[in-house]
Image: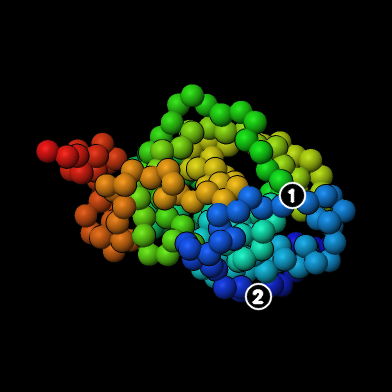
Amino acid sequence: MNHEAPGFRIKIVQAGEPVLRQTARSLSPEEIRSPAIQSLVAHMRATMRDAPGVGLAAPQIGVPLQIAVIEDRPEYLAGIAPEVLEERERTPVPFLVIVNPRIVEHSEETVEFFEGCLSVSGFSALVRRWRSVTVEYLDWEGQPQRMEAHGWPARILQHEIDHLFGNLYIDRMEPRSFSTLENMSRHWRDLPVAGVREALKRE
């Protein structure tokens, strides 16, 4: 089996589709190694890269299974100012398949940044998440794994794991920060989060 096999893009479903609000089904190691699931992973990888995005969960393509793929490629970071990367603690993440993931430990500290989603296309909002998490999961071969993530990689993991339990970032967002991507870029992109908070506070 080869998760690097060619795949084709599948339509990404949008908020309002019931599958995005269901708890996805877990898989056995034998199921993970099956040709059908290996093919699904390849298609998810192609879909994520084509979007482009840094993560994709199976429910986002209408499949209610506890599978997600993650990848934050170096070229995605190329146009971002170094100080922004440092603030977000964003570093490249190699391609990763996580099946049946569970957050087993997390930091007390939380951080807040703008977050978007391929299933809430065209919008973004401030979302508070744990700064660090430890996740246990099965890999693409059905083998148990445990990983610790910090900063932006931890945010990606939390976002994708939320999808597998029927949650979207809009459930966790600061409502007053909800914005189109165009307006976020125009008004908030270069401001620190504290500045955005100050600008959006009620009189």
The three-letter code of the residue at mark 2 reads Phe
Q: Residue drawn at (48%, 63%), measured in percent from left and top?
A: 16
- Name the residue type under label 1: Ser
Answer with left or right where residue 115 lies relative to residue 19. Answer: left
Residue under label 1: 26
Q: Residue at x 26, y 36 (%)?
A: 194
Q: Is residue 193 above or below residue 169?
A: above
Q: Is residue 118 above or below residue 196?
A: below
Q: Quadrant of residue 21?
A: bottom right
Q: Is residue 52 left or right of residue 116?
A: right
Q: Position of residue 166 (x, y in %)?
A: 57, 51
| Residue 198 in the image, given as x and y percentages of width and height | 19, 38
Among the two numbered marks 1 and 2 on one chain, the one whose residue lies closer to the N terminus: 2
| Quadrant in the picture for the N terminus | bottom right
Q: How are the colours assigned in the image?
A: rainbow
Residue at horizontal 25 percent and vertical 60 percent from the top: 183
Q: Mark 2 sits on what residue? A: 8
Q: Nearer the viewer, mark 1 or mark 2?
A: 1
Q: Nearer the viewer, residue 54 or 19?
A: 19
